[in-house]
Amino acid sequence: MSGGTLIPVDRLETRFADAKPTYADGEAVGEANRCLYCHDAPCVQACPTGIDIPGFIRKIATGNVRGSARVILSANLLGYSCARVCPVEVLCVGACVYNDWHRYPPIQIGRLQRYAVEKTFQAGRAATLLDRSPASGRKVACVGGGPASLAAAGYLALAGVSVTVFERRTMAGGLNTSGVAPYKMHVEGAIAEVEFIRSLGVTIRTGVEVGRDMDPATLLGDFDAVFLGVGLGPDARLGIPGEQGHGVTGATEWIERLKLEPGFALAGIGRALVVGGGNTAIDAARELARLGVGDVAMVYRRSLADMSGYAHEMDQARKDGVRLLERATPKEFARDAGGKLLALRLADGRELPADLVVVGIGQVRWRDLASRFPGVSVDDQGLVVVDPETGRTGNPKVFAGGDALGGELVVTAAQEGKRAARAILKSLGVKIRVDAPVAAGHP
């Protein structure tokens, strides 16, 4: 399923089992037949991309898996990764009417969605699933190869637009490739989706960094429109004494090494700390615990109630053996004369021994690149300023979505890419094919 992309074999992430394995045929049909196929279904309203959830589930129940995948991918070209990484507990599954009855569990929408799309991918039939329009003669560039850009590129290609995605890394997919917790999805799953987007007629150029290898002015001159789907930058730092040096790393950097670096190992790590209270911090802590680190604790400066991470993820972290230290503010890292990490000292005087500290307090934004496009502005937080209805920036040729706008979910990035594709097609006078319903309250 990984297409022609070369994926390293000796990766630490391969030690992680799938937390929600794909259904067998009988399991999928059985679960699909529990669905009530609600009219004006609340699960659809909870989905940012407006997938006809009862519609695709009914097709699984009747054995039409290909038709089910068509319903999903028509509304969300990233329906495969969303099925695996979406926080369904607070979206579609959380809105299922079964939750109100307290007798039966909610329909496992994400697992059914994964089943339909994965079966279609494995059969090699996804490329012909959706109709494509004749060539329009228009060209669009997408900067960044993450979810927002891939979604925009796919919908534009289906409408007959010639699309080129420019990705600075050697593999496209964004955080789906480099940052998703491996118990949710391995790299192979992310690359399978990238190859699906490529099969729609999208050109993906990796190892090309706009702003370094290609000037923004060149893009604006060579293409009819540009979509900015740039992701986040490096991990933010605590800025306290002793942070620089072996034993202290950023959360996304650590997760990326776990997923992609051949031979990466955790030799000599018996006690680990994760600083932060968001979902990335929780992921890192769970990964450490599942890899066998004996003592894993999260260090958070406020209380559990203030954490931005999802409650269901923190519950799972506790089941994995992760401890939570609340109201704990890091002050400095203690090291020996040779620079070896010994402990993390807190503002209240406590000292927490550690062999490894993972800092998961957010990431730096790429505000410089966006501002190099004439007419594109960023706000005080480094977010690209756009029209909320279209994703258009102050430059009529430039649109944006995903992390550039502050979104945190793959599904919202996919919807923002679809929204921008719709607006780009309208601005170029190309017939709009992006006509799937959109849930209320979502772009």
Image (tube, grey):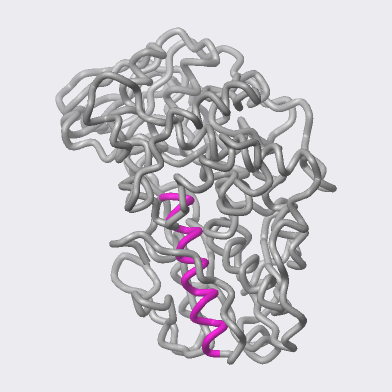
Using residue 373 as the reference point, say whether residue 216 is left or right of it: right
| Residue found at x 77% / y 67% | 201
Residue 372 in the image: state x and y as whole percent. 51, 81
Percent position of residue 431, x then y? 60, 84
- The magenta segment is 409-427
Question: In percent of the image, x 61 and y 30: which residue is there?
Answer: 258
> Residue pushed farthest front?
62
Number of callouts in the render? 0
Q: Quadrant of the C terminus?
A: bottom left
Q: Main secondary structure of the magenta part?
A: helix
> Is residue 191 on the magenta stretch?
no
Eyeballing the image, is 132 above or below 74?
below
- Looking at the image, which residue is at 57% across and 80% down? 432
Name above or below for residue 229 compared with residue 138: above
Front-most of residues 223 and 193 = 193
- Quadrant assignment, res 224: bottom right
Frontmost residue, 103 versus 16: 103
Provide residue 141's location: percent of width, then percent of height.
Answer: 65, 76
Where does the N terminus fall, quadrant-wise?
A: top right
Percent position of residue 34, x then y: 43, 28
Out of 315 and 62, give the one closest to the viewer: 62
Q: Answer above or below: position of 168 versus 239.
A: below
